[in-house]
Image: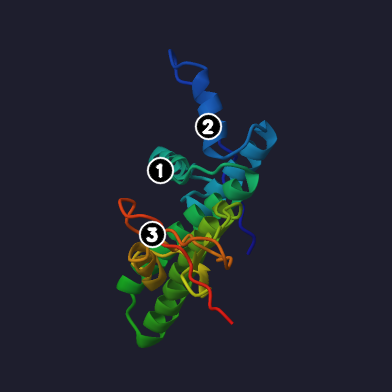
Amino acid sequence: MNHNPPKPVELVNAEGEPQTSMLAQLVAFGTTSNDFYSRTLRELLESGCRGTPSQPFEDSDVNGALAAMHGIAPRDEIEGMLAAQMVAVHSAAMRSLRQLKGSDTIAQQDSNGNLAVKLLRTYTAQIEALQRYRGKGDQKMTVEHVHVYQGGQAIVGAIHQGDAATEKAKDHPQSNAVTYNPGEPLACPNPVRKIVPVVHGQG
């Protein structure tokens, strides 16, 4: 049996409503293309809203679907398509849960329950896919720090709060002294005292 969906819905501004509302509808689908918006809206309504050839879509279903798209706030056409799928899958999952509630036999419970679980898992996977796509441009940067102590021992590693190397560096105010040349006087930690000369062995 072939399914004939209801006629496409044409959204127009209500009397006195500003023309900017049509632009807001495009933004809700992440696009500036009227063709993409019309196609995706038609697919969304046919898959996610109740309606038959003899019964048009209900206003509450259409407004609810548009509100869901606005809440997801897709930023481009890829996110717009994914958002429409999410709304449709959510609607299908809720229908399956209603059918599960009204199941009379174990076979019906198994069938409706398994379908509901698959749809709910799909919805969760769609949320994760949207989050990954939105984070595709994020970059991770690791800052390396070098600690050099007296004796020439160096510690290289990433800086972390409470890191042992960082705490140890605080206890070594002269950790910036990297080299020592024989014959040069050593700097005294106490600036009030005089510089201590280096004593060379006689031989």
Work out whether residue 102 can be spotted: no
In front of the other: 140 or 80: 140
- In the picture provided, is 190 more to the left or to the right than 93? left
Say the numbered circle drawn on residue 25: 2
**How many angstroms separate mark 2 from mark 1 (CA)?**
13 Å
Instruction: Residue 9: give x, y in percent of width and height.
Output: 56, 36
Quarter of the image with the N terminus in it: bottom right
Which comes sooner in the sequence, label 2 or label 1? 2
Say the numbered circle drawn on residue 182: none
**Residue drawn at the location 64% of the way across and 60% of the way down:** 2
What number of labels is visible? 3
Instruction: Residue 159: give x, y in percent of width and height.
Output: 45, 64
**Residue drawn at the location 51% of the way across and 20% of the way down:** 20
**How many angstroms separate mark 1 from mark 3 (CA)?**
76 Å
**Few, some or many C-alpha atoms within 10 Å of disc 3 (few <14, some 14-19, many ≥20)?**
few
Which comes sooner in the sequence, label 1 or label 3? 1
Q: Is residue 42 above or below residue 98?
A: above
Q: Which residue is mark 1?
A: 64
Q: Nearer the viewer, mark 2 or mark 1?
A: 2
Element type where label 3 sits in the image = loop
Q: Is residue 125 above or below residue 86?
A: below
Residue type at numbered disc 1: Gly
**How many angstroms separate mark 3 from mark 2 (CA)?**
73 Å
Element type where label 1 sits in the image = helix
Say the numbered circle drawn on residue 188: 3
Work out whether residue 71 can be spotted: yes
**Residue drawn at the location 38% of the way across and 41% of the way down:** 60
Instruction: Residue 19: give x, y in percent of width and height.
Output: 52, 17
Residue type at numbered disc 3: Cys
**Few, some or many C-alpha atoms within 10 Å of disc 1 (few <14, some 14-19, many ≥20)?**
some
In front of the other: 166 or 195: 195
In front of the other: 127 or 167: 167
